[in-house]
Amino acid sequence: MRKIYFFLFLALCFTHLANAQMVAALDYIYTSTPISANAIIGNVLSNDYFNNAPVDASQVIVTEIGSNPDVQLLPDGSVKALHDFTLESGATFYYEVCDMANPNNCSTSYFDLWVVSPAPPFGPAPTLTVLEPPTCNHPFATIQLSNFPYPAITTWIVWLGNQQAGFEYDGYQENSEDVIIENVPVGLLTLSVEDIIDGIRSSVTQFYLPHPSCELNLTFNGTLVDTNANSITDAGDAIDYQFTVTNDGSVPLTNVYIDSPTLTVQGTAIPLMAVGATDTTSFTATHVLTQDEIHANTVEHIATVYGTDGSVTRSDSYNVTTALQIPDGFKMVVFFDYNMNGIMDNNEQAHSSYFNIGTFDYEVNNDGQLHHISTSNTSFTFYETNPLNTYHLSLNLTPDYAAYYQSTTEYNITVAAGSGITTYYFPVSLIPHTDLKIWLDAPSLVRPGFPTTHKIRYVNIGNVPVSGTISYTPDSRMTITNTSVPVTAIPGGFTFAVNNLYPNDTQEVTVALQVLPSPAVNIGDSLTSTATSLNPNASAVQPTHTATKVQAVNSSYDPNDITEARGPQILHSSFSSADYLTYTIRFENTGNAEAINIEVDHLLDGLLDENTIRVLDASHNYVMERVGNNLTWTFGGINLDPSVEGTDIGKGYIVFEVKPKPGYAVGDIIPASASIYFDFNPAIVTETFHTEFVSALATKTFETDAVKVYPNPTKNTLHITRKNTNIQTVTVTDMLGKTVLSATANRPDVAIDLGALAKGMYLVKIRSGNSMQTFKVIRE
C-alpha cells in the first residue's frame, strides 16, 4: 500500500511543475471487481484542467507516452482494456496533454489501475464550501472543508495549493472536524487529504475558484473567414472579431470605448451605459493573417475596455487565442533505448532534457537549411498545413558527447491532410558516464557596502546518477553571511556535497553575501567569484568544471541585458579548447500588464561555433530554434506578471554556453546582444557585451582625470593625452567588436585619424601597462 502514497506525491509534483494553462492530474482506479477485455476503464481527461477550467477534449491533444500492452489510450482520453484484468493485476502508464493551439504547452501525469481485494478504502474528497467569496476589493476567499472520509476519528493531513498564485496551506486536522482556510486566492486549486495513521485513505481533487465580477467586463472571440475560398487557412485569410461589453457595476458608465495594441477596433464610444447593460454590436475588428501566423498555427490578440464613473476610470482586459486549423503535423520524441531494440518500451520514458545531448533537426523540401530545435519539454511538435512539403527529421548529437550517445534514426516524411499529429521516436543508446556541470548566477546588483546574492546552479548532464563535491570561493571583498544548505567552511569559501543527483536534475544553492564598503570596493571595480564541481568518475567528459563570475560594481541596474560569466576580458592562456563561454540573457516585464508571449533573438558572432551551443537553464518553459547562427527562444503563454522590486516576480532568464571556433587569438573581441520582444511591443535591444581575449588582465582603470579624449564627436583627427605616463597602444573597434584601427604609441599624447571610417559610434581602448580605459567616440 506504500505505492498509493508514492503516486499521491507524484500527483502533487506534476501539478506543481505543470504550465499554468495546462494541468494533468493523477488518475487512479483501485477496484476489487475484475475488468473484461475491451472495457472502457475511465477517461484521463475527466479531472484535467485547461485555462483554469475543466478540459474540453476538443481543445487538447492527449498522447500516451511509450506503449503499454495492457491498456490503450484513445484520442478522446478514454482508457480501453486490452485484456482481462483479474485480481492482483493492473497497469500504469504516462500520458501527455497538450494545448491544440500551442502544442508545446503540455502537462504530463500518470494513469494507475489496480484490481485488488479488498479494494483500498478510498474516500471522496471533503465537501468544500465557499464561506466568503472573493470581491473586487479583496480577491481572496474563505473556504470550509467538511465531511471528511471515513473513519470519523483520526488525524488528517490537509494540503491545499494554488501554484499559479504561490499559495499553499499544509496542516493537520484532528477527529475530522471542519477546516476553515482564509485568504485563498482565485484560480485553480488542488486539494488532498490523507489519513496520517495508515496513509492509505487519500483523495486528490482540483476545483476552480472564479475571479469576481468587477464592474466593467470585456470578452471577444474571432471567426475565421476564408477570403480566397480555397477551403484551407492561409495567408491573406482573415479573422473577424466581435466584442461584448457588460456594465456589472452599480452605477452607469460614460464614454465606454475599446483599445487594443494589436487590433484596429472599429466603432465609436458608447456615451452612456446603464447598470447591467450588455453591448455586442458597437465594436468590431478584422485581422488579416500573415504567413508567420500560419506557421505558428495560432493568432493571439488582447484588448481593453474603458469607462468613466464620475472621476474614476474603470477598465478590463481580455485576450483570445484563435487556432487556425485542425492540426496536422509531427512530434519528435527522444528516449534512452536501454535494451537497444529500437522501440520505446514501457520502462523507457521520453528523455526530458535531450537538449543536453543534442537537438531535434528538420529540413524542409531539401532546401539545405537545417532548423535545430531544443526545448524544455519532453518533445517538439510542428504543425504543417501543406501535404506537398517534405521533411527530413533527425537527432543531432552535440560533438562533445558523441562518444557517450549514439542515434542513427532518421525519417523522410510528408504530412497528409487530416492525419493529425504523427509521433516519430528517436532511440538513443548510451555508454554510462557522469558529468556534473556548474555555473554561477548573480541576480542582484553589486554595490559597495550593500548585501547581494549568488546562486550556484548545477546539473547532472550525464546519464547515470552522480555524487560529488562542489567548492565555492567568492571575491575576497565579499563576505558570506548565509547559505541555503549546510556547507563546510574552507579558507575563503566553502564546500558542499552532491549526493545521488539523477540525470537532468538541476539544483541550486543560494549564497547571501555582504559587499565591503568603500574604499575597499568602488564603482568600476570588478569582483571575481568561482565555483568548481568535481566529477568523481573517470568517465566524465571533464574531470572538473569551473565556473567564474565577474561582476562590475555599478550604481544602476539594467533589467534587460546579456553578459558573459567571465566578464569583458578573458586571459587567453587560461582558456582551453574544452572551455565554453557562458552567457546569461535576462529579461524583465517593467510594464503594467502581463506579457503573454516573449521572444528572445540572438545572433551568434562569427567567432563562435554554433554547433556547440547548449542551453543550461531557463526560468520558464521554452522552445529554442537555431537556423545557422540565428537563435530564437520562444516563451509561449508565459503570462509574465509585471515585475515586483526585490523579488523574482516578472523576471526571466536564459543561460547558454557556446565554444569559440578554433584559432581564437589575443585581441579577438566577441560582441553579444539580444533583442527581446514582449508580446507585440517593439524590440528591447540590450547593450552590446564585448568579450576580449587578452594576454594579461587589466588590474585597474585610469584615474578619472588622467586621460583626455577630444574632440568628441570628431570629423577626422582624435587627440588622446595622459598625464605623466606614456600611452602604449590605442585600439579602435566598431560596435560589433571588429578592430578597424590600431596604433602603438609609447608617448603621453597620440593623434588618431578617423577620417577613413564610416560615420557612427566606435570604442577606443587605451592601454598603458596594466591600466586600460575604453571610451565611446562618435565619428561625424
Image: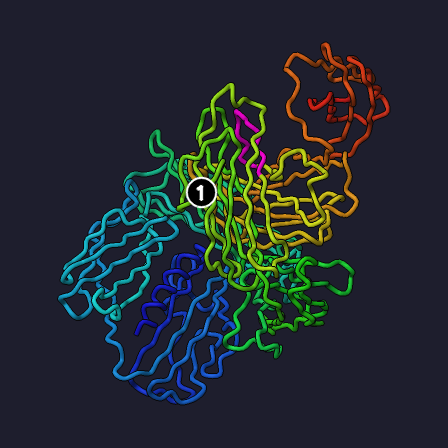
Q: Nearer the viewer, residue 262 or 778?
A: 778
Is residue 762 shown left or right of residue 380? right
Amino acid carrying mark 1 in the image = Thr
Residue matched to label 1: 510
Q: Quick check: 281 left or right of 565?
A: left
Seen at 78% across and 14% down, the residue is 719
Residue at left 31%, top 71%?
2
Q: Please, is residue 33 above or below residue 485 in the view?
A: below
Counting from the top left corner in percent of width and height, residue 225 is at 58, 59
Above or below: residue 553 compared with residue 29: above
Q: Secondary structure at mark 1?
A: strand
Choose top left, top right, bottom left or bottom right for residue 564: top right
**On the picture, is 357 further left or further right than 160?**
right
Which residues fall within the magenta stretch? 549-560
Residue 553 in the image, given as x and y percentages of width and height: 55, 27
Instruction: Give residue 491's position: percent from left, percent from top.
Output: 49, 37
The quadrant the N terminus occupies is bottom left
Q: Residue at x 16, y 65 (%)?
A: 154
